[in-house]
Image: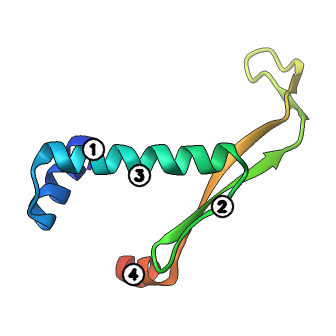
Amino acid sequence: MNKTDLIEGMAEHAGISKSAAKKALESFLGNVEKSLKNGDRVSLVGFGSFSVSKRAAREGRNPQTGKTIKIAAKKVVKFKAGSDLQKAVN
């Protein structure tokens, strides 16, 4: 499923236009992004939670040359599925 399919599904399920569904989805994604940028956690009970974690700098290897390289520290987004989503998938 891609973004277009999701918008169509939302519009059909909620009985709204595709443009309204697109606005709602973009608003949701924008708010999640803004919260994660601020270091906050986004929890949707039963669905899951998004959080930001820090990954430390480390050394790695270039697979072509075998040379050691430095990999910079960075922040990564994590998603942990909620219990209801876990049950639905299994």
| Discs 1/2, front | 1
Quadrant position of the C terminus in the picture: bottom left
* Amino acid type shown at disc 2: Arg
Determine the residue positioned at 16% across, 42% down. Answer: 19
Q: Secondary structure at mark 3?
A: helix
Instruction: Specify few, some or many for label 3: CA neighbours under 10 Å numbering under 14, 14-19, or 20 or more.
Output: few
- Between label 1 and label 4, give the one nearer the viewer: 1
Residue that carries the numbered disc 4 in the rendered image: 90
Amino acid type for the residue under numbered disc 4: Asn
Query: Alpha-carbon distance for marks 1 and 3?
Result: 9 Å
Q: CA distance from mark 1 to mark 2?
A: 23 Å
- Mark found first going from the N terminus, 1 or 3: 1
Looking at the image, is mark 2 or mark 4 earlier in the sequence?
2
Q: State the CA–CA distance, disc 1 to disc 4.
A: 31 Å
Q: Left or right: where does residue 75 sit relative to residue 69?
A: left
Location of mark 2 (residue): 41
Looking at the image, is mark 2 or mark 3 earlier in the sequence?
Answer: 3
Look at 75% across and 41% down and name the residue there. Answer: 75
Cα–Cα span, label 2 and label 3: 14 Å
Going 85% across and 34% down the picture, which residue do you hit? 73
- Badge 2 crowding class, 10 Å Cα cut-off, few under 14, some 14 to 19, many 20 or more, is some
- Which amino acid does the dot numbered 3 rest on? Phe
* 3D distance between C-alphas at marks 3 and 4: 26 Å
Q: Which residue is mark 1?
A: 23
Q: Which residue is mark 3?
A: 28
Question: Of discs 2 and 4, which sits in the foreground?
Answer: 2
Whether residue 31 is visible here, answered yes or no, is yes
Give how far across and how far down residue 78 sits, in percent: 63, 55
Name the spot of residue 2 as percent of width and height, x first. 28, 44
